[in-house]
Amino acid sequence: MAHAKVRRVVTGHGSDSKSRVVADGAVEPITSDLMPGCAIYRLWGRDERPVFPDDGSPRRAEAHYPPRDGSRFMINTIAPGELTPSPDVGLPAAWEKLERQAPGAAGAMEPDAPGMHTTDSLDYVLIVSGEVTLELDDGDQTVLRAGDVLVQNGTRHAWRNHGAEPCTIVGVAVGADRAETGFRH
């Protein structure tokens, strides 16, 4: 399945402190044979709090999920059905490639509960098209449709697309601390 490119326009401040467009171009999707039909667009991110004026140049943001003072801006397309790799996919190589493309994303996944993961982030999510089921602990499920928003507060969760069409979500993840309390993650 071919995925569209997403146009990203970035502003910044010139040496005269005036605002200007500093970048305008396409962002290629990250795809994986492990998740056929899915795509991840890493649109922007940084590992530290912003300070302005800013020249608009990309900042360090290697890991897929943000650290404490970082943030990530992404679009994800979730294919319908079970995300099962084709039998001819070389799994070790596919996992290594995913780790190179989205460092730490695979490591956040629970090996004994496919799709379930927990991140130390506050995520603001908008469902743009299609529908997706948010699964939480104990199988608790909530269906989200185009136009719905989710504020995901660092909870253990998975995305399941039980529909017939791909689902596109836009998300901003803001890094957070996780206290060692009686709450489980």
Image: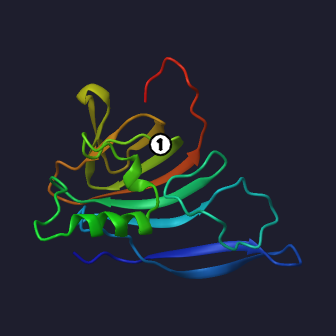
Residue extending farthest front: 92
Q: Is residue 75 left or right of residue 137?
A: right
Crowdedness of circle 1 by 10 Å Cα count: few (<14), some, many (20+)?
Answer: many
Q: Which residue is mark 1?
A: 119
Residue extending farthest right: 16
Viewer-proximal residue, 29 or 64?
Answer: 64
Query: What colouring does the structure picture have?
Result: rainbow
Q: Is residue 115 left or right of residue 7?
A: left
Residue at position x 26%, y 55% in the image: 130
**Quadrant in the picture for the C terminus:** top left
Q: Is residue 176 left or right of residue 89?
A: right
The quarter holding residue 14 reads: bottom right
Percent from the top left, x then y, of residue 105? 41, 55
Residue at position x 53%, y 49% in the image: 173
Q: Is residue 53 left or right of residue 82?
A: right
**Quadrant in the picture for the N terminus:** bottom left
